[in-house]
Image (spheres, rainbow, N blue to C red):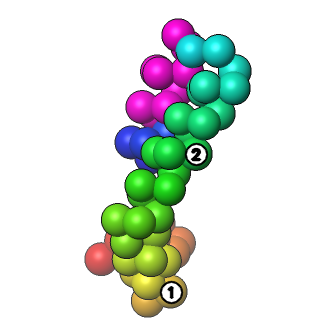
Amino acid sequence: MLGDRRSAYEAASLPFDRAMAREFELGLATIESGETLKGAARFAGGAGRHGRFK
């Protein structure tokens, strides 16, 4: 989510093509960090379902 926020702020001052390239760069960095797999594993384990995060 922080990457999306950052992308939105940065995109305001960039031409469309550069904004899209930056969105891709930030998204790739998130995937490479392992954050997406950790989050998916937590969800598969039940976290976040029905409003419960414990």
Which residue lies most toward the bottom here?
45
Mark 1 residue element:
helix
Residue 44 location (% of width, % of height): 50, 86
Residue 12 visible in this rendered orientation of the protein: yes
Q: Residue at x 69, y 26 (%)?
A: 17
Write down the residue under mark 2: 24
> Magenta region's main secondary structure?
helix
Residue 35 visible in this rendered orientation of the protein: no
Seen in the picture, residue 17 relative to 36 is either above or below; the reply is above
Residue 20 location (% of width, % of height): 65, 33
Mark 2 residue element:
helix
Seen in the picture, residue 26 relative to 34 is either above or below; the reply is above
Quarter of the image for residue 30 reads bottom left
Q: Amino acid at mark 2?
A: Phe
Q: Is residue 17 left or right of residue 25?
A: right
Write down the residue under mark 1: 44
Who is closer to the viewer here, 35 or 50?
35
Seen in the picture, residue 51 relative to 22 is either above or below; the reply is below
The quarter in which the C terminus is drawn is: bottom left
Magenta-tinted stretch: 5-13
Q: Is residue 38 magenta?
A: no
Distance between mark 2 and mark 1 Cα atoms: 26 Å
Q: Amino acid at mark 1?
A: Ala
Residue 7 location (% of width, % of height): 49, 32
Q: Please tell me which of labels 2 and 1 falls first in the chain.
A: 2
Q: Residues within 10 Å of mark 2 (few under 14, many from 20)?
A: few
Single out the mark in the foreground, 2 or 1. Answer: 2
Q: Residue at x 38, y 77 (%)?
A: 38
Who is closer to the viewer here, 20 or 37?
20
Which residue lies most toward the left here?
54
Q: Residue at x 47, y 21 (%)?
A: 10
